[in-house]
Amino acid sequence: MPTIVCVAGARPNYMKIKPVLDALEARGARTALVHTGQHYDESMNEVFFRDLGLRPPDHHLGTGSGTHAEQTARVMTAFEPLVDTLAPDAVVVVGDVNSTLACALVAAKAGRVVAHVEAGLRSRDWSMPEEINRVVTDRVSDLLFAPSPDAVANLRAEGYRDDQIHLAGNVMIDTLYTNLDRALASDALARHGLTAGGYGLVTLHRPANVDTPEMLAALLEALGQIAAGTPLILPVHPRTATRLESAGVPAGLRLIPPAGYLDFIALQASARLVLTDSGGVQEETTALGVPCLTLRDNTERPITVDEGTNQVVGRDPARIVAAAAAVLRDPPARRRPALWDGRAGERIAEVLLGRLRTPDAPRPTDLVALLAQRGR
Ligand code: UD1
Ligand code: UDP
């Protein structure tokens, strides 16, 4: 059986890699779980291994924080010799963080089959570091596992071959369904003095929202107005923590440390409203049927708007407050997107192991030649 390296490094990676790892192992593949160390606080890291039942990493690269170049370079420098030693048949990367890009680049240059889980999402906003990571990771990947038809359409429009693109569904929703009963049994609401349906949940960590004091102040003003009618709770991401120290936090907005996975799912599931700039939270609220307002100008996850409970409301305080009032009055109906059914990890494992049994499929570097042949 093949050996497959599975990479995780930051909070949203753990819930994405777990179902893939499980499905590969259930089919007899040898796996190595590599943690890049991009996130390292107990509340951004260990708690997820415990909550998800993820085994300790087989290899830890210990790279930590830094500028984009420092962090990406440190992951690459540490991952390259490991890939040489392990000589895996394939490397699986998930999502759009710096660790994803760094490990995909190393694996592609080492001649390994690269599989990108959550391929094809596009915000078309090049000011987001994640958009650069998504586009470049897809470009060096052999197998592109898309969570939704819009992602498939993006990949087709960019010229990827049909044999590279696989509509797999959403691995983050696999993990949500696996853990939902345990999350609902948690005492997170009681611990925070909340009642189901009686509060709103907030997350904020996008650099465009929290790194500029003026933008953060505008968002806090909007949250303060909403909190005057509906109490809000905000588990604070470490990027945001230092910025909030120098900003005035309005009454009614309660700050708590980053929540563990089970607690956070419990808080989402019982919230009357979620306000967020997270990617994953837009998806989880759609699956849970909880109204979500996305505090950004765009989303790479349009299916959560077209079929789910999400609205992209921008960053203007008056617009955010009006949208919150409307959604509290009249919560949206939802439809669960196709293939967000808890089996995405299994579909990915089937395709990846099948691809490794037929290793003569064309590599992405052949793409330019193929497109030239087709006259495109
Ligand atoms: C990263 C991802 C982002 C993802 C987010 C999920 C990139 C470019 N960004 O953003 O796409 O949505 O993770 O949470 O990869 N820090 C700590 N402790 C930690 C981790 C970070 O204190 O365990 C602090 C450090 O000051 C660090 C800052 O947070 O400099 C930012 O961390 P970093 O991983 O660079 O980016 P995130 O904002 O977390
Ligand atoms: N999450 C969590 N605790 C929190 C905030 C988020 O467990 O305090 C979970 C959330 O349920 C989802 C994932 O973290 O599964 C989303 O990660 P994040 O918002 O950090 O990153 P993004 O999805 O924006 O890349």
Image (spheres, rainbow, N blue to C red):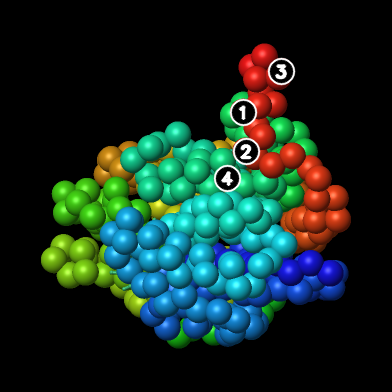
- On-image quarter of the N terminus: bottom right
Residue 194 screen position, x and y as percent: 45, 76
User: Which residue was labeled with disc 4?
Assistant: 140
CB atoms at circles 4 and 2 under 8 Å apart? no
Residue picked out by circle 2: 365
Tell me which numbered mark, 3 or 1, is placed earlier along the sequence.
1
Residue type, label 2: Thr
Residue 353 percent location from the top left of the image: 81, 59
Residue of label 1: 368
| Quarter that holds the C terminus | top right
Pointer 1 or 4: first along the chain:
4
Query: Residue shown at 65%/32% (left/top)?
Result: 367
Mark 4 vs mark 2, CA separation in Å: 8 Å
Q: Which residue is mark 3?
A: 374
Residue in the foreground of this view, choosing between 234 and 75: 75
Relative height, residue 102 to residue 311 (above, below): below
Mark 3 or mark 4, which is nearer the start of the sequence?
Answer: 4
Residue 96 marker: none
Three-letter amino acid code of the residue under disc 1: Val
Residue 343, located in which quarter of the rendered image? bottom right
Whether residues under marks 2 and 1 lie with C-beta atoms below 8 angstroms apart, the answer is: yes
Q: From the viewer's perspective, tell me whether residue 84 is left or right of residue 247.
A: right
Q: How many badges with numbers are in the image?
A: 4
**Where's residue 60, x and y in %?**
50, 79
| Residue at position x 30%, y 53% in the image | 207
